[in-house]
Each structure stands twice: as C-alpha cells, then as structure tokens.
Image: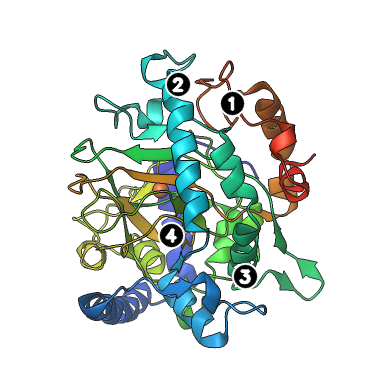
Amino acid sequence: MALSTNDIPGQIREVKKRLRQQVGDYAGVFQAVSKAMETEVERIKRLNETGSAIPEFDFADIGPEGFNDEQRRLIEIAGSAVIHNTLPRDETDSNNEQLANYIVSNGYYTQVPEATDNYFSQLKSDKPQIFGIYWSKAQIWARQHPNMAQVRKHLNRVWKWQDGDQVHFDPDLNLAYADRIRRREPGDASLGLSPHVDSGSIERWIEPNYNHVYHKLFSQNWQEYDAFDGTARTAVEEFPSPAVCSMFRTYQGWVAMTPQGPGDGTLQMVPSYLAVPYMLLRAIQDDVPEDDLCGAAPGRALTVSPQWHPLLLEGLVSIPHMNAGDTVWWHPDTIHAVEDVHGGTGYSNVIYVGAVPDCDKNRSFLPKQKDAFLKGASCPDFAAENYELKYTDRASVDDLTELGKKQMGF
Ligand SMILES: [Fe+2]
C-alpha cells in the first residue's frame, strides 16, 4: 500500500482509533512506559555526571567475535555508541587536510550551486556548515576503510538480522551511501538542529511495516518490544522528502575529522531505547487533539517538543569528547540534535558515514548513485547542487579498493 498525503488529519483520527483498540488500556500502558522513561532519564543523568551516558568503546576493545554480551546490552539500551580510535589518527589528519584543500582550491565558497537545497538552506549563515560534497578522496577513504567495515559489521550484528530462514539484511557487508560533510568554524552560531528522530514521522503510526515494527508497543506486552529486531524495518516506506534517506540504515554515524566535544557545536542525543516508544504512546493519549500526533508532519523529521515531551528533553546530553578518527553511531530511533553555538576554538569537522547493510532496498539505490559518482554529480538523495562536476582531485574508480567497488555496486 502506497502512503498517501490525502486527508492526513482523517488518517490520524483513523489510526488513533485503531491503535487504542489494539492496546486496550492505552493510558495505563503509557503510564508504565513513562515510569520506565523516568528511570531512564535518571540513568542518563547519573552516567553523565561522571562520564558519558553514550557507551564508549575503543576499537581495540572489540574482539574478533564482535561485541560481547555486556557491550551489546549497553548499545541496545542507549541506542548509540562511540568507538574511539576507529581510524588511525595520522591518516585522519592527512585526510582532513586533503578535504580542506579540495573544498578551498576548487572554489566551493564562491560557487553558485545548480539547485538549492531547501531543507538545509534555512540553516545557512555566512558560511555553510553542511557541505554538498560527496566525492572527495577523504570521504571515499572513510567509507571503504577496513576498520569502518569491521566496526559496522559488529554494530549490525547487535541487530536481529535474520529470523529462521528469513534474512532481513546481510550484517557483514555495508554498502556505500554518499552522505555529506560538516565543517563548523569556531564561533559559528548558525542554528544547530533541534532534537528530532530521522527515518519518518507520522509513518511510524500509519505505515503498515512500521505497524509491524511497533506492534508489541501498542499492546499490553510493551516490554517485549525490541528496537533491534530487523523484521519489517527494511520494507518501511516513507513520504518522499529531502530529509529522508532512501537507504535503510542500522545506524547513522560520523567520523570525527578534528577533536570536538561538548560545547563545540556538536551532536547531542537522548541515549535511550525507550524514547520513541514514549513518543508513540504519548500521541494517542486523550489530551492530544484527535487529528494531531504531537506535531508530527509528513516529510519532516519527527520532532521532540517541550509541550508534549518535556521528560525526554531532560535526557538530552552532548556526546563525549571525540578525537580525530573516533566515530559515533546512533540507531534510527534515537533522538539527536546539534548544539546551536560552536563555542570551542577549533574547526569541528565530520564526515557522515552510516551503517548501510546489504539488502534489496539498499542495493536498488546503488545504480543511480554509481552514475552520480562517475559524473561527479550530487548524491541522488540530495538537492542536485552538483558542486563537484568540474572539481580537480575528485575521487574516481581508480581510488576504490576491492571493497569500495563492492560497496558502490561495481
Ligand atoms: Fe537527524
């Protein structure tokens, strides 16, 4: 069934009726989830007093078998992880320099894009912080680095990726998704991003595959809900929007190209698996208008609001200090935000690289992405700014390793 934007208020009224019937005592279930979420917020605050509520690992801590049971449990609860020293420091530094040269010497700052990016254009100040750059050698380096392949494979395996003979995705092979970069100057006070969740807004209530993903939540057995169960996740359909990623990501993530920490205009999260369950059940309570899902709107990110979710905002914390070569990863249901002001002293630069496991949905995106790569056009998921068409020193097929070729669908 294709999603329809017809009569959204009517669809919302319909789905609320259905979900309330499905749950039964929906006020009671929400109360129980709220209690559990309060405990989660206490946990986050307690951990953040002495360290980080986002579990931190060192690349060297991850054994050849992947995360051990205790490590897995931490990732499942927090819906996120930081892996220090994922990429060697010296390689990261030289790639950061290469990337800066690529942007400056090709004239990015004075160039007029072929098309404008409406989604991010409101965020622009004098200089951009998110760059429509997809094919620098540094990005290729990050996407195809064997350490990244290793980390993503083990992170994917935290998910339930098969059920009997039904394989949801291949955890051991990650495909390339040509995402962008962030370079934020010290002192930059252009807007950050307010707390939100990617991968769909009202879809989470009305889309049939999401209904399956969340069916345990909308029942008396909400404790049995498993955010890391891959069943139906790769089949989810979203309203088309420049804010939406066409590929299924087990985690969004980035590589720190420079050191950065709290206060440096960097990432914040509500590191709890319970945050989206709380939002889903909150919206079907009686005090929310019948045709509203706490402000969720099609084609937009699902936002966390002071009006409806003050408890969740109490659990918003900055990620720990990151050094060049460290990576951070968050589950598609993890609430995240970007600090408004960069109050630090150095550039805070990142290359976005998510975990994109091989599956039908993800493979079907590769041909058009490959064409864009060969031409130097923008990744087809983003505005066709096409900055890099004539750039010198752009990555070519010769820069792809065997794994890089596989990831790109060559
Ligand atoms: Fe986001």
* 261 vs 345, nearest the viewer: 345
The residue under label 3 is: 154
Tell me the element at label 2. Answer: helix
Quick check: 169 above or below 248?
below
Density class for disc 3 (Cα within 10 Å; few <14, some 14-19, many ≥20) is: many
Taking the spot 56% from the left edge, 70% from the top edge, the residue there is 228
- Which amino acid, mark 4? Lys
Q: Quadrant of residue 126?
A: top left
Numbered circle sitting on residue 393: 1
Alpha carbon separation for disc pair 1 and 2: 10 Å
Number of residues whose C-alpha sits closer than 10 Å to that of mark 4, classed few (under 14), some (14–19) or many (20 or more): few
The residue that mark 4 highlights is 17
Label 1's element?
loop
Mark 1 and mark 2 in contact? Answer it, CB < 8 Å.
Answer: yes
Q: Is residue 2 above or below residue 251?
A: above
Give the mark nearest the N terminus, 1 or 2. 2
Q: What residue is pinned by disc 2? A: 105
Is 49 left or right of 410, judged from the image as shown? left
Residue at (57% x, 84% y) in the render: 68
The response on whether ligand 1 sits within 8 Å of label 2 is no
In contact (CB < 8 Å): disc 3 and disc 1: no
Whether residue 132 is visible: no
**Alpha-carbon span between mark 4 and mark 3:** 40 Å
**Earlier-in-chain disc, 4 versus 2:** 4
Q: Which of 357 and 238 lies nearest the eye of the viewer?
A: 357
Mark in front: 4 vs 3: 3
Nearest-to-viewer mark from 3 and 1: 1
- Residue for point 58% across, 15% down: 390
> Which mark identifies residue 358?
none
